[in-house]
Image: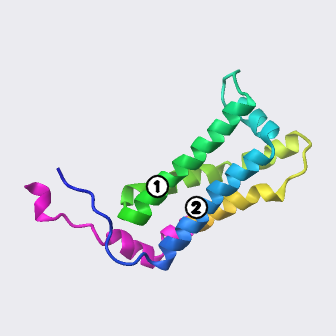
Amino acid sequence: MPRITPAKGRRPRSIQLFVVSFLGAAIYAFLLGLGDLELQQTAYAAAFAWDGWSRDWTIVTLSALLSVALIPVGLIYIFANRIARWLVTVFTLIELANLPGMIATFQTADEPVRWSYFAQPLLLALSLLFLFLPESNRWFSQGKGSSPETFN
């Protein structure tokens, strides 16, 4: 079985900026949710068909989402894992595609658009940009070939 080994060398600036922006987006979403637990609980109740949402479950869900964000960051930063790169890309694009729905929700609820809610999508978009800069591409291509040990 092939061993997964950490990527060699210094991490490029673009990968470091990806980590900062992606984790910044995750931490920002976490803190924003904790800042208004009632609103977050209402949002989860509307999004997920479960009548058991409580303050505690909202905190658990926010914490789980923050923890899940750490996994691809570790895989990318430590191992230069290309699968994690594409998973981050797909899920970030899905989240960014939700922006028009988020704006429509504010308008439907006669709630003013809170510009602070756009900080997280902006950080996510920046993190995607950093993932696909030329120096990031070189970082991800460093372990592309198969080594002879893989087939032993």
Compared to residue 39, the image places residue 69 above or below, namely below
Going by the image, does 110 lie left or right of 75?
A: right
Asked whether residue 36 is drawn in magenta, I would say: no
Where residue 10 appears, as percent x and y from the top left, is 39, 78
Going by the image, does 143 lie left or right of 146?
A: right
Residue at 65%, 64% in the rendered image: 123
Q: Looking at numbered disc 2 in the image, what kind of residue is underneath it?
A: Phe
Q: Secondary structure at mark 1?
A: helix
Instruction: Verify CB contact (< 8 Å) between mark 1 and mark 2.
Output: yes
Q: Main secondary structure of the magenta part?
A: helix
Residue 149 visible within the image: yes
Residue denoted by label 2: 22
- The label shown at residue 72 is 1
Question: Between marks 1 and 2, how big is the CA–CA gap?
Answer: 10 Å
Q: Secondary structure at mark 2?
A: helix
Residue at 57%, 54% in the rendered image: 93
Q: Residue furthest front?
A: 56
Q: Looking at numbered disc 1 in the image, what kind of residue is underneath it?
A: Pro
Stretch in magenta: 128-152
Residue at 52%, 47% in the rendered image: 68
